[in-house]
Amino acid sequence: MRIFLVGQGFFAAQVAGELTVAGHRVLGAASPRLRDGHNDKEDPRSWDRLRAWAHRAAANWTDSTVLRPDEVPEDTELIVAAHAHAFIGAAARRRARVAAIGYHPSLLPLHRGRDAVRWTVRDRDRVTGGTVYHLTDRVDAGPVAAQEHVLVPPTVTARGLWRDLLAPLGVRLLLRVADDLANGVRIEEPQDESLATWEPAMSVPPLARDLTVVGPTRR
């Protein structure tokens, strides 16, 4: 598959690398310019890790905060959102000839929103998981392409849950769905809106709040 990747951090860079190893072609990537906590625009060590990966791979890179549809290559077959905090609108999604998918670290439709892992730990959930879903105009609400659960260790932190369990699961599920789509297998299971929950971000305004689900909200 010819893929355009939108995301950030170690997770997005790992997804890009694994997709390439699996035989897919990453045409370009969009990410923030700098890593969290870094502000030296001239120092490549401050670059976001997906940006650094694109530089090493000689792939096109653009700033995800100002991503325009025409920056998605015309021959893109698949858009992959890997820890993307930039909303990918319909015009950009239409640039992908086959699909636009994303990974969310919860058992959607539970824990929609950008701080799903932190809410999982805060609520002391004993079971969570990861979901690859088709991107739509409603955040985290698109049809499910793949989903698996994991058990939550009783003393785990949000950082540890993401790093040790949910990020590796996300890489594997995104690769599975990319391979499925390359082989003509397309899975789209609607989410059950009666079970949907939306948790607000704990540190920043929620992403495109007016495009979120109808359902219970944490207060």
Image (cartoon, rainbow, N blue to C red):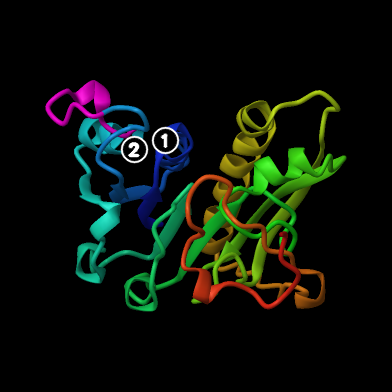
Q: Is residue 131 magenta?
A: no
Secondary structure under tag 1 reads helix
- Quadrant occupied by the C terminus: bottom right
- Please report the residue visible at 51 percent of the width from the left and 76 percent of the height from the top: 210
Q: Which of 80 and 139 is in front in this view?
A: 139
Question: In the rendered view, does 68 fall on the left or right side of 105?
Answer: left
Horizontal and vertical percent position of residue 2: 35, 57
Residue pictured at 63% horizontal, 34% vertical: 162
Left or right, residue 207 beside residue 158: left
Q: Which amino acid does label 2 sit on?
A: Leu
Where is mark 2, residue-wise?
A: 50
Task: Give the secondary structure at mark 2.
Answer: helix
Please give the range of residues in magenta: 39-48
Inspect the magenta stretch and tell me whether residue 43 lies in it.
Answer: yes
Task: Specify the amino acid type for callout 1.
Answer: Gly
How far across and how far down the image is residue 35, in percent?
33, 32
Quarter of the figure with residue 43: top left
Residue at 46% x, 55% y: name it.
Answer: 81
Mark 1 / mark 2, whichever is N-terminal: 1
**Residue 63: percent from the left, percent from the top?**
24, 50
The label on residue 9 is 1
Q: Nearer the viewer, residue 107 or 95?
A: 107
Q: Is residue 195 above or below residue 52?
A: below
**Location of residue 141 by image quarter:** bottom right
Task: State the predominant SS element of the stretch in magenta.
Answer: loop
Q: In which quarter of the image is residue 21?
A: top left
Res. 215 visible in picture: yes
